[in-house]
Image: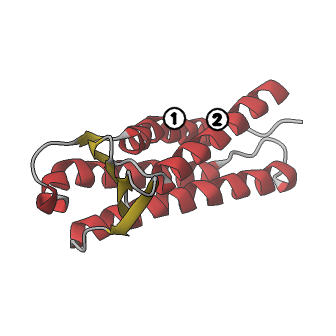
Amino acid sequence: MSLLLFGVTALHIAILIILFVATLDSSWWVLSEDETLNLWHDCIFNNISQSWMCTSVSTNEWFHAVQALVVLSVLFSSFAFMLFMCQLYTMEKGGLFYATGVFQILASLAVFSGAVIYATRVSEFHKDKGEGGSFGHCFVLAWVAFPLSMLSGIMYIHLRKRE
């Protein structure tokens, strides 16, 4: 049982790390080696000063929805982890981790929704940047977080507390 708890806890921590990196790192859309766009800033690498120069991103309502959904996924997953730790020490033997599972599934659905909106509206978000570009590693991490957090949520729902 302790190995199962360790595995579930390690998976949840890995999901949290993936969600934090996807939310805060600088590569949801890559135009070239010198320009990346994330959920918060549009950054261009300045060769003269050898530093990144960043400006605010799109003011599109859909873009704000993506930002909100990705932040919600981090909050839901963080709350699920704290709830799991509390339930682990306070729940009676034989209890199920329903609440933790529900919040983890909500995190999964939030990151899924944000990634789908971003994928379908990316040309609208970056229309002033011209043609070209590709999805960056943060976008990929958001998609990786979706099935992992869904799997984790389902595991929590079926997990019983034992001695």
Task: Give the distance between the C-alpha atoms of the residues marked 2 and 1, in whole angstroms.
Answer: 10 Å
In terms of secondary structure, where does tag 2 sit?
A: helix
Neighbour tally class for label 2: few under 14, some 14-19, many 20 plus, Cα within 10 Å: some
Q: Residue 136 at what x, y percent from top left? A: 34, 41
Q: Residue at x 27, y 65 (%)?
A: 63
Whether the residues at callouts 2 and 1 have beta carbons within 8 Å, the answer is: yes
The N terminus, quarter of image? top right
Which residue does the numbered mark 1 point to in the structure image?
151
Q: Is residue 96 left or right of residue 63?
A: right
Neighbour tally class for label 1: few under 14, some 14-19, many 20 plus, Cα within 10 Å: some
Mark closer to the observer (2, 1): 2
Disc 2 or 1, which lies upstream in sequence? 2
Q: Residue 65 at what x, y percent from top left? A: 31, 67
Q: Residue at x 51, y 35 (%)?
A: 151
Residue 11's tag is: 2
Q: Is residue 159 left or right of residue 65?
A: right
Q: Residue 33 at what x, y percent from top left? A: 32, 40
Q: Residue 30 at what x, y percent from top left? A: 29, 44
The C terminus, quarter of image? top right
Residue 88 visible here: yes
* Amino acid type shown at disc 1: Leu
In terms of secondary structure, where does tag 1 sit?
A: helix
- Front residue of 46/60: it is 46
* Amino acid type shown at disc 2: Leu
Residue 1 visible here: no
Residue at the outermost right position: 163
Residue 28's tag is: none
Total residue callouts: 2
Q: Residue at x 56, y 62 (%)?
A: 75
